[in-house]
Amino acid sequence: MPQDPEATEISFDGSTTELDALQRAVYAVADLMTVDIRASGTDYICALFPRRSGLDQDTLKHRIRAEVTDQSLRLRIARETEPIRNLIFALAFSETGLADSGKPDE
Amino acid sequence: MNLRLLRDATAMPPSGWQLLPMRFHRFDSDSVLLTNLVGEHLFVPQDQFLAVIDGTCDDQELLARLRARHLIQRPGDRLPAELLAIKLRTRLRHLPDSTGLHIFVVTLRCEHTCRYCQVSRQSSARSEFDMSQETARRALALAFRSPSPHLKFEFQGGEPLLNFPLLRWIVREANRINQDHGKDLAFVIATNLALLDDEILRFCAEEDVHISTSLDGPADLHNHNRRRPGQDSWQKTVAGIRLVQGRLGPGRVSALMTTTEASLDRARDIIDTYAELGLRNVFLRPISPYGFALRPRGGAGYDVDRWLRFYEAGLDYIIDLNRGGLPMVESYAAIIARKMFSNQDPGYVDLTSPAGIGLGALVYNYDGDVYASDEGRMLAEMNDHTFRLGNVATSSYEDILLNEKLLQPLAESYTLSAPMCHSCAFEPYCGADPVFHHATAGDFVGHKATSAFCRRNMGIFKALLRRAREDKFTRELFWRWGQR
Protein backbone atom coordinates (compact mmCIF):
# COMPACT_ATOMS: atom_id res chain seq x y z
CA MET A 1 0.00 0.00 0.00
CA PRO A 2 1.37 3.50 -0.84
CA GLN A 3 2.41 5.79 2.05
CA ASP A 4 0.38 8.78 0.83
CA PRO A 5 -2.91 8.70 2.85
CA GLU A 6 -4.86 9.99 -0.18
CA ALA A 7 -3.41 7.32 -2.49
CA THR A 8 -5.12 4.06 -3.23
CA GLU A 9 -4.52 0.82 -5.10
CA ILE A 10 -6.31 -1.02 -7.86
CA SER A 11 -5.38 -4.23 -9.64
CA PHE A 12 -5.90 -5.37 -13.22
CA ASP A 13 -5.89 -8.97 -14.39
CA GLY A 14 -2.84 -9.40 -16.61
CA SER A 15 -4.56 -12.11 -18.64
CA THR A 16 -7.26 -9.68 -19.82
CA THR A 17 -5.48 -6.32 -19.65
CA GLU A 18 -2.47 -5.42 -21.76
CA LEU A 19 0.35 -3.44 -20.19
CA ASP A 20 0.27 -1.15 -23.25
CA ALA A 21 -3.39 -0.27 -22.57
CA LEU A 22 -2.58 0.32 -18.93
CA GLN A 23 0.31 2.63 -19.73
CA ARG A 24 -1.76 4.58 -22.26
CA ALA A 25 -4.51 4.97 -19.68
CA VAL A 26 -2.02 6.23 -17.09
CA TYR A 27 -0.83 8.86 -19.57
CA ALA A 28 -4.40 9.95 -20.34
CA VAL A 29 -5.39 10.48 -16.71
CA ALA A 30 -2.24 12.36 -15.76
CA ASP A 31 -4.24 15.54 -15.17
CA LEU A 32 -5.95 13.80 -12.22
CA MET A 33 -3.41 11.34 -10.87
CA THR A 34 0.00 9.79 -11.25
CA VAL A 35 0.24 6.01 -11.19
CA ASP A 36 2.84 3.43 -10.20
CA ILE A 37 2.44 0.13 -12.03
CA ARG A 38 4.05 -3.06 -10.76
CA ALA A 39 3.57 -6.67 -11.75
CA SER A 40 2.46 -9.14 -9.10
CA GLY A 41 2.01 -12.69 -10.35
CA THR A 42 -0.36 -12.40 -13.31
CA ASP A 43 -1.82 -9.09 -12.11
CA TYR A 44 -0.80 -5.46 -12.47
CA ILE A 45 -1.05 -3.53 -9.22
CA CYS A 46 -1.54 0.20 -9.74
CA ALA A 47 -0.98 2.72 -6.95
CA LEU A 48 -2.99 5.86 -7.70
CA PHE A 49 -1.71 9.19 -6.36
CA PRO A 50 -4.11 12.14 -6.69
CA ARG A 51 -2.67 15.29 -8.25
CA ARG A 52 -4.52 17.49 -5.78
CA SER A 53 -6.32 17.01 -2.52
CA GLY A 54 -10.05 16.49 -2.44
CA LEU A 55 -10.18 13.82 -5.14
CA ASP A 56 -11.80 10.81 -3.53
CA GLN A 57 -10.37 7.36 -4.08
CA ASP A 58 -13.49 5.92 -5.75
CA THR A 59 -13.39 8.68 -8.36
CA LEU A 60 -9.78 7.84 -9.16
CA LYS A 61 -10.55 4.13 -9.45
CA HIS A 62 -13.59 4.67 -11.70
CA ARG A 63 -11.62 7.02 -13.90
CA ILE A 64 -8.66 4.67 -14.41
CA ARG A 65 -10.92 1.66 -14.96
CA ALA A 66 -12.95 3.49 -17.60
CA GLU A 67 -9.77 4.73 -19.27
CA VAL A 68 -8.19 1.26 -19.35
CA THR A 69 -11.35 -0.12 -20.95
CA ASP A 70 -11.29 2.56 -23.64
CA GLN A 71 -7.58 2.19 -24.30
CA SER A 72 -8.00 -1.59 -24.65
CA LEU A 73 -10.76 -0.96 -27.16
CA ARG A 74 -8.58 1.49 -29.07
CA LEU A 75 -5.78 -1.08 -29.27
CA ARG A 76 -8.22 -3.69 -30.50
CA ILE A 77 -9.64 -1.40 -33.20
CA ALA A 78 -6.14 -0.34 -34.24
CA ARG A 79 -5.03 -3.99 -34.57
CA GLU A 80 -8.13 -5.01 -36.48
CA THR A 81 -7.88 -2.12 -38.92
CA GLU A 82 -4.11 -1.97 -39.34
CA PRO A 83 -3.94 -3.78 -42.71
CA ILE A 84 -6.54 -1.57 -44.33
CA ARG A 85 -5.05 1.53 -42.71
CA ASN A 86 -1.72 0.69 -44.32
CA LEU A 87 -3.47 0.06 -47.63
CA ILE A 88 -5.20 3.46 -47.50
CA PHE A 89 -1.94 5.28 -46.73
CA ALA A 90 -0.16 3.36 -49.50
CA LEU A 91 -2.88 4.32 -51.98
CA ALA A 92 -2.92 7.92 -50.77
CA PHE A 93 0.81 8.43 -51.25
CA SER A 94 1.30 6.24 -54.31
CA GLU A 95 0.78 9.07 -56.81
CA THR A 96 2.23 12.04 -54.98
CA GLY A 97 5.87 11.52 -55.84
CA LEU A 98 6.67 12.31 -52.21
CA ALA A 99 8.26 8.91 -51.68
CA ASP A 100 10.41 9.14 -54.82
CA SER A 101 13.42 10.83 -53.25
CA GLY A 102 15.94 9.43 -55.74
CA LYS A 103 14.51 11.36 -58.67
CA PRO A 104 16.86 14.14 -59.81
CA ASP A 105 15.57 17.70 -60.12
CA GLU A 106 14.38 18.53 -63.59
CA MET B 1 -41.66 -2.39 -52.71
CA ASN B 2 -38.53 -0.77 -54.11
CA LEU B 3 -37.53 0.47 -50.67
CA ARG B 4 -38.02 -3.02 -49.23
CA LEU B 5 -35.85 -4.53 -51.95
CA LEU B 6 -33.16 -1.90 -51.35
CA ARG B 7 -33.18 -2.54 -47.60
CA ASP B 8 -32.94 -6.29 -48.10
CA ALA B 9 -30.13 -5.90 -50.59
CA THR B 10 -28.03 -3.72 -48.30
CA ALA B 11 -28.83 -5.41 -44.98
CA MET B 12 -25.78 -6.71 -43.15
CA PRO B 13 -25.93 -9.89 -41.08
CA PRO B 14 -24.20 -10.04 -37.68
CA SER B 15 -20.42 -9.95 -38.14
CA GLY B 16 -21.08 -9.12 -41.77
CA TRP B 17 -18.89 -6.02 -41.72
CA GLN B 18 -15.28 -5.03 -41.23
CA LEU B 19 -14.16 -2.06 -39.22
CA LEU B 20 -12.38 0.70 -41.09
CA PRO B 21 -9.75 2.77 -39.26
CA MET B 22 -11.66 4.84 -36.73
CA ARG B 23 -11.19 6.71 -33.50
CA PHE B 24 -13.76 7.35 -30.82
CA HIS B 25 -14.52 9.81 -28.05
CA ARG B 26 -17.19 9.35 -25.39
CA PHE B 27 -19.00 12.57 -26.20
CA ASP B 28 -21.65 12.59 -23.49
CA SER B 29 -23.56 10.09 -21.36
CA ASP B 30 -25.63 8.96 -24.35
CA SER B 31 -23.35 8.97 -27.33
CA VAL B 32 -19.93 8.18 -28.72
CA LEU B 33 -18.34 10.25 -31.45
CA LEU B 34 -16.67 8.21 -34.20
CA THR B 35 -14.32 9.78 -36.73
CA ASN B 36 -12.69 8.13 -39.72
CA LEU B 37 -9.21 8.75 -41.11
CA VAL B 38 -10.21 12.04 -42.73
CA GLY B 39 -12.48 13.42 -40.02
CA GLU B 40 -15.90 12.38 -41.32
CA HIS B 41 -17.89 11.72 -38.20
CA LEU B 42 -20.96 10.09 -36.74
CA PHE B 43 -22.55 10.00 -33.30
CA VAL B 44 -23.44 6.49 -32.18
CA PRO B 45 -25.58 5.62 -29.13
CA GLN B 46 -23.43 4.37 -26.23
CA ASP B 47 -25.32 1.08 -26.12
CA GLN B 48 -24.76 0.42 -29.83
CA PHE B 49 -21.09 1.34 -29.91
CA LEU B 50 -19.74 -1.94 -28.54
CA ALA B 51 -22.22 -3.89 -30.67
CA VAL B 52 -20.75 -2.22 -33.77
CA ILE B 53 -17.21 -3.12 -32.71
CA ASP B 54 -18.20 -6.65 -31.70
CA GLY B 55 -20.17 -7.32 -34.88
CA THR B 56 -23.46 -7.86 -33.08
CA CYS B 57 -25.31 -4.67 -34.02
CA ASP B 58 -28.60 -5.32 -35.82
CA ASP B 59 -29.65 -1.70 -36.33
CA GLN B 60 -29.59 -1.63 -40.12
CA GLU B 61 -30.12 2.12 -40.33
CA LEU B 62 -27.11 2.75 -38.09
CA LEU B 63 -25.00 0.27 -40.07
CA ALA B 64 -25.96 2.02 -43.30
CA ARG B 65 -24.87 5.37 -41.86
CA LEU B 66 -21.59 3.87 -40.63
CA ARG B 67 -20.94 2.55 -44.14
CA ALA B 68 -21.76 5.90 -45.68
CA ARG B 69 -19.20 7.58 -43.39
CA HIS B 70 -16.52 4.99 -44.26
CA LEU B 71 -16.40 3.67 -40.70
CA ILE B 72 -17.27 0.09 -41.67
CA GLN B 73 -17.34 -1.85 -44.93
CA ARG B 74 -18.48 -5.19 -46.28
CA PRO B 75 -15.68 -7.79 -46.39
CA GLY B 76 -13.91 -7.59 -49.73
CA ASP B 77 -15.07 -4.04 -50.52
CA ARG B 78 -12.37 -2.08 -52.34
CA LEU B 79 -14.07 1.24 -52.94
CA PRO B 80 -14.05 2.63 -49.36
CA ALA B 81 -10.25 2.30 -49.13
CA GLU B 82 -9.81 4.01 -52.50
CA LEU B 83 -12.17 6.84 -51.57
CA LEU B 84 -10.50 7.34 -48.21
CA ALA B 85 -7.11 7.44 -49.94
CA ILE B 86 -8.32 10.12 -52.36
CA LYS B 87 -9.75 12.19 -49.50
CA LEU B 88 -6.57 11.77 -47.46
CA ARG B 89 -4.44 12.86 -50.40
CA THR B 90 -6.71 15.88 -50.90
CA ARG B 91 -6.26 16.89 -47.28
CA LEU B 92 -2.49 16.63 -47.52
CA ARG B 93 -2.01 18.16 -50.94
CA HIS B 94 -0.75 21.47 -49.55
CA LEU B 95 2.32 19.77 -48.07
CA PRO B 96 4.56 19.61 -51.16
CA ASP B 97 3.85 23.32 -51.73
CA SER B 98 5.63 24.75 -48.69
CA THR B 99 6.20 27.65 -47.72
CA GLY B 100 3.31 29.99 -48.53
CA LEU B 101 3.57 32.71 -45.89
CA HIS B 102 6.64 34.95 -45.60
CA ILE B 103 6.58 37.44 -42.75
CA PHE B 104 8.88 40.44 -42.98
CA VAL B 105 9.49 42.26 -39.69
CA VAL B 106 10.48 45.53 -41.32
CA THR B 107 10.97 47.32 -38.01
CA LEU B 108 10.66 46.73 -34.29
CA ARG B 109 9.73 50.36 -33.74
CA CYS B 110 6.22 51.14 -32.59
CA GLU B 111 4.33 54.13 -31.24
CA HIS B 112 1.92 51.87 -29.31
CA THR B 113 2.72 50.24 -25.95
CA CYS B 114 0.14 47.43 -25.93
CA ARG B 115 -0.20 45.42 -22.71
CA TYR B 116 0.22 42.06 -24.37
CA CYS B 117 2.80 42.92 -27.03
CA GLN B 118 5.17 39.96 -27.23
CA VAL B 119 8.13 41.75 -28.77
CA SER B 120 10.35 44.57 -27.63
CA ARG B 121 8.74 47.94 -28.11
CA GLN B 122 11.41 50.25 -29.45
CA SER B 123 11.23 54.00 -29.61
CA SER B 124 9.93 55.38 -32.88
CA ALA B 125 13.19 57.26 -33.35
CA ARG B 126 15.64 54.34 -33.22
CA SER B 127 16.29 53.35 -36.81
CA GLU B 128 18.77 50.62 -35.84
CA PHE B 129 15.73 48.41 -35.34
CA ASP B 130 14.73 48.78 -38.99
CA MET B 131 15.35 46.08 -41.60
CA SER B 132 17.87 47.16 -44.25
CA GLN B 133 17.27 46.93 -47.98
CA GLU B 134 20.09 44.40 -48.29
CA THR B 135 18.49 42.16 -45.66
CA ALA B 136 15.14 42.46 -47.42
CA ARG B 137 16.73 41.62 -50.78
CA ARG B 138 18.26 38.43 -49.36
CA ALA B 139 15.00 37.49 -47.64
CA LEU B 140 13.12 37.91 -50.92
CA ALA B 141 15.60 35.62 -52.66
CA LEU B 142 14.91 32.95 -50.02
CA ALA B 143 11.15 33.43 -50.23
CA PHE B 144 11.17 32.87 -53.98
CA ARG B 145 12.94 29.53 -53.47
CA SER B 146 9.72 28.21 -51.93
CA PRO B 147 7.99 25.69 -54.19
CA SER B 148 4.55 27.09 -53.36
CA PRO B 149 2.81 28.65 -56.37
CA HIS B 150 1.18 31.12 -53.96
CA LEU B 151 3.36 33.44 -51.89
CA LYS B 152 1.88 35.76 -49.30
CA PHE B 153 4.12 38.51 -47.96
CA GLU B 154 3.01 39.86 -44.61
CA PHE B 155 4.62 42.95 -43.11
CA GLN B 156 4.81 43.11 -39.35
CA GLY B 157 6.56 45.04 -36.64
CA GLY B 158 6.61 46.88 -34.38
CA GLU B 159 4.53 49.06 -36.60
CA PRO B 160 5.56 48.30 -40.20
CA LEU B 161 4.34 51.65 -41.53
CA LEU B 162 7.18 53.27 -39.57
CA ASN B 163 9.44 51.77 -42.24
CA PHE B 164 7.11 52.37 -45.15
CA PRO B 165 9.88 53.17 -47.71
CA LEU B 166 11.34 49.67 -47.28
CA LEU B 167 7.91 48.02 -47.29
CA ARG B 168 7.12 49.75 -50.60
CA TRP B 169 10.47 48.68 -52.03
CA ILE B 170 9.86 45.04 -51.04
CA VAL B 171 6.44 44.93 -52.72
CA ARG B 172 7.78 46.41 -55.94
CA GLU B 173 10.89 44.24 -55.90
CA ALA B 174 8.81 41.10 -55.27
CA ASN B 175 6.60 41.93 -58.24
CA ARG B 176 9.69 42.53 -60.37
CA ILE B 177 11.30 39.21 -59.36
CA ASN B 178 8.01 37.44 -59.95
CA GLN B 179 8.09 38.30 -63.63
CA ASP B 180 10.48 35.34 -63.91
CA HIS B 181 8.48 33.07 -61.58
CA GLY B 182 4.81 33.64 -62.37
CA LYS B 183 3.65 32.89 -58.85
CA ASP B 184 0.44 34.18 -57.35
CA LEU B 185 1.55 36.95 -54.95
CA ALA B 186 -0.41 38.56 -52.14
CA PHE B 187 0.65 41.36 -49.80
CA VAL B 188 -0.71 42.16 -46.34
CA ILE B 189 0.31 44.92 -43.96
CA ALA B 190 -0.38 44.13 -40.29
CA THR B 191 -0.76 47.65 -38.95
CA ASN B 192 -2.49 49.56 -36.17
CA LEU B 193 -3.48 52.12 -38.86
CA ALA B 194 -2.44 55.10 -36.72
CA LEU B 195 0.01 56.23 -39.40
CA LEU B 196 -2.20 55.65 -42.44
CA ASP B 197 -2.10 58.51 -44.93
CA ASP B 198 -2.94 59.27 -48.55
CA GLU B 199 0.41 58.14 -49.89
CA ILE B 200 0.07 54.73 -48.23
CA LEU B 201 -3.54 54.35 -49.38
CA ARG B 202 -2.58 55.16 -52.97
CA PHE B 203 0.22 52.62 -52.80
CA CYS B 204 -2.11 49.92 -51.41
CA ALA B 205 -4.60 50.65 -54.18
CA GLU B 206 -1.96 50.50 -56.90
CA GLU B 207 -0.26 47.32 -55.67
CA ASP B 208 -3.36 45.48 -54.42
CA VAL B 209 -2.09 45.39 -50.83
CA HIS B 210 -4.46 44.23 -48.09
CA ILE B 211 -4.63 45.64 -44.59
CA SER B 212 -4.88 43.56 -41.43
CA THR B 213 -5.37 45.51 -38.25
CA SER B 214 -5.93 44.92 -34.55
CA LEU B 215 -9.29 45.76 -33.07
CA ASP B 216 -9.94 44.47 -29.57
CA GLY B 217 -13.55 45.66 -29.33
CA PRO B 218 -15.26 48.86 -28.19
CA ALA B 219 -13.24 51.99 -27.45
CA ASP B 220 -12.80 51.53 -23.70
CA LEU B 221 -11.61 47.91 -24.01
CA HIS B 222 -9.39 48.53 -27.04
CA ASN B 223 -7.74 51.60 -25.50
CA HIS B 224 -7.26 49.73 -22.21
CA ASN B 225 -5.32 47.00 -24.05
CA ARG B 226 -3.63 49.05 -26.74
CA ARG B 227 -2.07 52.15 -25.29
CA ARG B 228 -0.52 55.04 -27.17
CA PRO B 229 0.08 58.71 -26.42
CA GLY B 230 -3.31 60.43 -26.33
CA GLN B 231 -5.16 57.18 -25.53
CA ASP B 232 -6.76 57.34 -28.98
CA SER B 233 -5.74 54.01 -30.52
CA TRP B 234 -9.37 52.94 -31.11
CA GLN B 235 -10.30 56.24 -32.71
CA LYS B 236 -7.34 56.04 -35.09
CA THR B 237 -7.93 52.38 -35.90
CA VAL B 238 -11.63 52.88 -36.61
CA ALA B 239 -10.93 55.96 -38.72
CA GLY B 240 -8.34 53.93 -40.64
CA ILE B 241 -10.71 51.02 -41.20
CA ARG B 242 -13.36 53.36 -42.59
CA LEU B 243 -10.80 55.08 -44.80
CA VAL B 244 -9.57 51.77 -46.26
CA GLN B 245 -13.12 50.52 -46.76
CA GLY B 246 -14.07 53.73 -48.53
CA ARG B 247 -10.99 54.11 -50.70
CA LEU B 248 -9.99 50.50 -51.40
CA GLY B 249 -13.21 48.57 -50.83
CA PRO B 250 -14.82 46.79 -47.87
CA GLY B 251 -12.98 43.52 -48.50
CA ARG B 252 -9.53 45.07 -48.33
CA VAL B 253 -9.32 45.39 -44.56
CA SER B 254 -9.72 42.75 -41.88
CA ALA B 255 -9.16 42.85 -38.15
CA LEU B 256 -7.95 40.56 -35.38
CA MET B 257 -8.68 40.77 -31.69
CA THR B 258 -6.73 39.54 -28.70
CA THR B 259 -8.57 38.34 -25.61
CA THR B 260 -7.32 39.81 -22.34
CA GLU B 261 -8.86 39.41 -18.91
CA ALA B 262 -10.79 42.60 -19.56
CA SER B 263 -12.39 41.02 -22.66
CA LEU B 264 -13.84 37.96 -20.97
CA ASP B 265 -17.29 39.41 -20.20
CA ARG B 266 -17.44 41.51 -23.35
CA ALA B 267 -17.95 39.00 -26.20
CA ARG B 268 -21.12 40.71 -27.43
CA ASP B 269 -19.61 44.19 -27.26
CA ILE B 270 -16.59 43.03 -29.26
CA ILE B 271 -18.70 41.38 -31.95
CA ASP B 272 -21.08 44.37 -32.14
CA THR B 273 -18.09 46.65 -32.72
CA TYR B 274 -17.04 44.52 -35.68
CA ALA B 275 -20.59 44.33 -37.04
CA GLU B 276 -21.07 48.11 -36.81
CA LEU B 277 -17.89 48.62 -38.81
CA GLY B 278 -19.01 46.18 -41.51
CA LEU B 279 -16.28 43.69 -40.56
CA ARG B 280 -17.95 40.33 -41.11
CA ASN B 281 -15.13 38.12 -39.77
CA VAL B 282 -14.33 38.01 -36.06
CA PHE B 283 -11.39 35.89 -34.92
CA LEU B 284 -11.86 35.22 -31.20
CA ARG B 285 -8.22 34.65 -30.24
CA PRO B 286 -6.75 33.79 -26.86
CA ILE B 287 -3.64 35.64 -25.82
CA SER B 288 -0.39 33.91 -26.76
CA PRO B 289 1.55 32.75 -23.70
CA TYR B 290 4.80 34.34 -24.82
CA GLY B 291 6.98 37.26 -23.96
CA PHE B 292 5.60 40.33 -22.25
CA ALA B 293 2.04 38.98 -22.30
CA LEU B 294 3.01 36.87 -19.29
CA ARG B 295 3.73 39.89 -17.11
CA PRO B 296 1.13 40.60 -14.40
CA ARG B 297 -0.36 43.46 -16.43
CA GLY B 298 -0.03 41.62 -19.75
CA GLY B 299 -3.64 40.46 -19.78
CA ALA B 300 -2.97 36.70 -19.86
CA GLY B 301 -4.31 35.99 -16.37
CA TYR B 302 -7.11 33.60 -17.25
CA ASP B 303 -7.34 29.85 -17.69
CA VAL B 304 -8.67 27.71 -20.52
CA ASP B 305 -12.10 27.23 -18.92
CA ARG B 306 -12.68 30.97 -18.65
CA TRP B 307 -11.55 31.48 -22.21
CA LEU B 308 -13.85 28.72 -23.46
CA ARG B 309 -16.83 30.35 -21.74
CA PHE B 310 -15.94 33.58 -23.50
CA TYR B 311 -15.50 31.79 -26.83
CA GLU B 312 -18.79 29.91 -26.61
CA ALA B 313 -20.68 33.07 -25.63
CA GLY B 314 -19.20 34.81 -28.67
CA LEU B 315 -19.90 31.88 -30.96
CA ASP B 316 -23.54 31.69 -29.84
CA TYR B 317 -23.98 35.41 -30.40
CA ILE B 318 -22.53 35.14 -33.92
CA ILE B 319 -24.87 32.22 -34.67
CA ASP B 320 -27.80 34.34 -33.42
CA LEU B 321 -26.76 37.25 -35.62
CA ASN B 322 -26.71 34.89 -38.60
CA ARG B 323 -30.13 33.61 -37.63
CA GLY B 324 -31.30 37.20 -37.70
CA GLY B 325 -29.86 37.69 -41.19
CA LEU B 326 -26.44 39.25 -40.48
CA PRO B 327 -23.78 37.02 -42.10
CA MET B 328 -21.00 37.16 -39.48
CA VAL B 329 -18.25 34.51 -39.32
CA GLU B 330 -16.10 33.36 -36.40
CA SER B 331 -12.81 32.76 -38.19
CA TYR B 332 -11.37 30.00 -36.02
CA ALA B 333 -14.62 28.04 -36.17
CA ALA B 334 -14.58 28.49 -39.96
CA ILE B 335 -11.05 27.01 -40.16
CA ILE B 336 -12.17 24.00 -38.12
CA ALA B 337 -15.46 23.71 -40.03
CA ARG B 338 -13.42 23.33 -43.20
CA LYS B 339 -11.69 20.33 -41.65
CA MET B 340 -14.94 18.91 -40.24
CA PHE B 341 -17.27 19.41 -43.15
CA SER B 342 -15.04 19.22 -46.22
CA ASN B 343 -12.05 17.21 -47.37
CA GLN B 344 -9.85 20.29 -47.47
CA ASP B 345 -7.23 21.27 -44.93
CA PRO B 346 -6.86 25.06 -44.91
CA GLY B 347 -3.25 24.62 -43.76
CA TYR B 348 -3.70 27.14 -40.96
CA VAL B 349 -0.25 27.42 -39.37
CA ASP B 350 -1.39 26.92 -35.76
CA LEU B 351 -3.72 24.01 -36.49
CA THR B 352 -2.14 21.62 -38.91
CA SER B 353 0.03 18.50 -38.74
CA PRO B 354 2.88 18.29 -39.61
CA ALA B 355 3.14 21.58 -37.77
CA GLY B 356 2.97 24.80 -39.74
CA ILE B 357 6.34 26.07 -38.53
CA GLY B 358 8.70 26.55 -41.46
CA LEU B 359 6.46 24.57 -43.81
CA GLY B 360 3.60 27.05 -43.57
CA ALA B 361 5.45 30.21 -42.63
CA LEU B 362 8.91 31.72 -42.34
CA VAL B 363 9.70 34.92 -40.48
CA TYR B 364 12.49 37.28 -41.50
CA ASN B 365 13.34 39.48 -38.55
CA TYR B 366 14.59 43.07 -38.94
CA ASP B 367 18.17 41.90 -38.31
CA GLY B 368 18.05 39.10 -40.88
CA ASP B 369 17.45 36.25 -38.48
CA VAL B 370 15.03 33.68 -39.86
CA TYR B 371 12.47 32.05 -37.56
CA ALA B 372 10.17 29.08 -38.04
CA SER B 373 7.15 31.07 -36.88
CA ASP B 374 6.13 34.43 -35.50
CA GLU B 375 5.84 32.88 -32.05
CA GLY B 376 9.41 31.60 -32.46
CA ARG B 377 10.49 35.18 -33.02
CA MET B 378 8.60 36.26 -29.89
CA LEU B 379 10.45 33.65 -27.84
CA ALA B 380 13.73 34.99 -29.20
CA GLU B 381 12.82 38.40 -27.76
CA MET B 382 12.95 36.62 -24.39
CA ASN B 383 16.38 35.15 -25.27
CA ASP B 384 15.05 31.73 -26.30
CA HIS B 385 16.48 31.09 -29.77
CA THR B 386 15.18 27.53 -30.18
CA PHE B 387 13.32 28.35 -33.39
CA ARG B 388 15.97 30.54 -35.02
CA LEU B 389 16.82 28.72 -38.25
CA GLY B 390 19.55 30.96 -39.60
CA ASN B 391 20.26 34.40 -40.96
CA VAL B 392 19.63 35.68 -44.47
CA ALA B 393 23.23 36.91 -44.68
CA THR B 394 24.82 33.53 -44.08
CA SER B 395 22.22 30.77 -44.54
CA SER B 396 21.07 29.14 -47.76
CA TYR B 397 17.52 27.98 -48.37
CA GLU B 398 18.69 24.43 -47.73
CA ASP B 399 20.40 25.48 -44.48
CA ILE B 400 17.09 26.88 -43.26
CA LEU B 401 14.58 24.27 -44.42
CA LEU B 402 16.77 21.26 -43.61
CA ASN B 403 17.91 22.66 -40.29
CA GLU B 404 17.60 20.13 -37.48
CA LYS B 405 16.07 22.95 -35.42
CA LEU B 406 13.10 22.73 -37.79
CA LEU B 407 13.04 19.02 -38.61
CA GLN B 408 13.23 17.84 -35.00
CA PRO B 409 10.15 19.72 -33.72
CA LEU B 410 8.25 18.78 -36.90
CA ALA B 411 9.01 15.09 -36.43
CA GLU B 412 8.47 14.98 -32.67
CA SER B 413 5.17 16.84 -32.68
CA TYR B 414 3.54 15.05 -35.64
CA THR B 415 0.07 14.14 -34.37
CA LEU B 416 -0.12 10.71 -35.99
CA SER B 417 2.74 9.61 -33.75
CA ALA B 418 2.44 11.86 -30.67
CA PRO B 419 1.14 10.16 -27.51
CA MET B 420 -2.65 10.46 -27.16
CA CYS B 421 -2.95 12.51 -30.37
CA HIS B 422 -2.63 9.49 -32.65
CA SER B 423 -5.66 7.81 -31.08
CA CYS B 424 -7.68 11.00 -30.50
CA ALA B 425 -11.01 11.25 -32.34
CA PHE B 426 -10.37 14.96 -32.90
CA GLU B 427 -6.94 14.49 -34.51
CA PRO B 428 -8.19 15.18 -38.07
CA TYR B 429 -9.39 18.62 -36.91
CA CYS B 430 -6.41 19.46 -34.74
CA GLY B 431 -2.74 20.26 -35.24
CA ALA B 432 0.71 20.18 -33.75
CA ASP B 433 2.03 23.29 -32.05
CA PRO B 434 5.63 22.59 -31.01
CA VAL B 435 6.28 26.28 -30.25
CA PHE B 436 3.41 26.49 -27.77
CA HIS B 437 4.44 23.27 -26.07
CA HIS B 438 8.09 24.27 -25.98
CA ALA B 439 7.10 27.57 -24.35
CA THR B 440 4.68 26.04 -21.84
CA ALA B 441 5.98 22.50 -21.19
CA GLY B 442 9.64 22.64 -22.16
CA ASP B 443 9.50 20.14 -25.03
CA PHE B 444 7.98 20.04 -28.52
CA VAL B 445 5.22 17.56 -27.68
CA GLY B 446 4.00 18.57 -24.23
CA HIS B 447 1.87 16.29 -22.11
CA LYS B 448 -1.48 16.02 -23.79
CA ALA B 449 -3.39 15.23 -20.63
CA THR B 450 -2.36 18.57 -19.16
CA SER B 451 -1.79 20.65 -22.30
CA ALA B 452 -3.72 23.92 -22.49
CA PHE B 453 -3.52 23.70 -26.30
CA CYS B 454 -5.20 20.30 -26.22
CA ARG B 455 -7.81 21.37 -23.67
CA ARG B 456 -8.69 24.56 -25.51
CA ASN B 457 -8.98 22.96 -28.93
CA MET B 458 -10.91 19.93 -27.70
CA GLY B 459 -13.27 22.34 -25.97
CA ILE B 460 -13.82 24.18 -29.25
CA PHE B 461 -14.26 20.98 -31.30
CA LYS B 462 -16.88 19.75 -28.86
CA ALA B 463 -18.63 23.12 -28.79
CA LEU B 464 -18.89 23.14 -32.58
CA LEU B 465 -19.99 19.51 -32.89
CA ARG B 466 -22.57 19.87 -30.11
CA ARG B 467 -24.13 22.91 -31.75
CA ALA B 468 -24.06 21.36 -35.23
CA ARG B 469 -25.68 18.23 -33.88
CA GLU B 470 -28.45 19.96 -31.98
CA ASP B 471 -29.53 22.62 -34.44
CA LYS B 472 -30.13 22.34 -38.19
CA PHE B 473 -29.55 26.06 -38.84
CA THR B 474 -26.18 25.95 -37.06
CA ARG B 475 -25.19 22.75 -38.87
CA GLU B 476 -25.90 24.37 -42.24
CA LEU B 477 -24.12 27.56 -41.16
CA PHE B 478 -20.96 25.65 -40.17
CA TRP B 479 -21.17 23.68 -43.40
CA ARG B 480 -21.23 26.96 -45.37
CA TRP B 481 -18.27 28.27 -43.36
CA GLY B 482 -16.45 25.05 -44.21
CA GLN B 483 -16.96 25.50 -47.94
CA ARG B 484 -15.64 29.10 -48.09
Image (cartoon, rainbow, N blue to C red):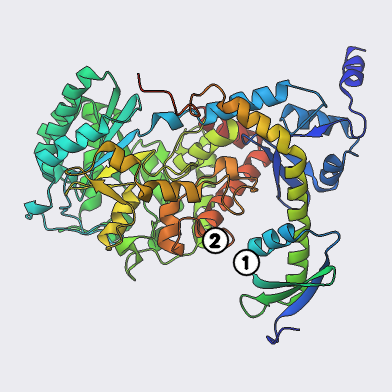
Residue B395, horizontal then vertical, whole percent: 23, 43
Instruction: Kindly indicate the quadrant of the structure image that contains residue B240.
Output: top left
Residue projecting furthest to the top? B2
Residue B271 higher or lower than B6, as above or below: below
Instruction: Kindly indicate the quadrant of the structure image that contains residue A5.
Output: bottom right
Secondary-structure class at tag 1: loop
Camera-side residue: B272 or A28? A28
Any mark on residue A30, and which? 1
Left or right: B89, with B261 as reference point: right
User: What is the distance, in whole Å, between disc 2 and disc 1 at their CAs?
Assistant: 9 Å
Marks 2/1 same chain:
no
Amino acid at circle 2: His
- The answer to whether residue B149 of the structure is visible from this angle is yes
Amino acid at circle 1: Ala
Residues packed near mark 1 inside 10 Å, few (<14), some (14 to 19) or many (20 plus): some
Secondary-structure class at tag 2: loop
Taking the spot 78% from the left edge, 64% from the top edge, the residue there is A65
Residue B51, horizontal then vertical, whole percent: 87, 43
Left or right: B365, with B274 as reference point: left
Disc 2 to disc 1: CB gap under 8 Å: yes
- Chain name for mark 2: B
Residues packed near mark 2 inside 10 Å, few (<14), some (14 to 19) or many (20 plus): some
Taking the spot 85% from the left edge, 59% from the top edge, the residue there is A16
Instruction: Kindly indicate the quadrant of the structure image that contains residue B56.
Output: top right
Quadrant of the snapshot with the N terminus of chain B: top right
Left or right: A53, with B273 as reference point: right
Any mark on residue B447, and which? 2
- Chain name for mark 1: A
Taking the spot 29% from the left edge, 42% from the top edge, the residue there is B399
Taking the spot 45% from the left edge, 32% from the top edge, the residue there is B95
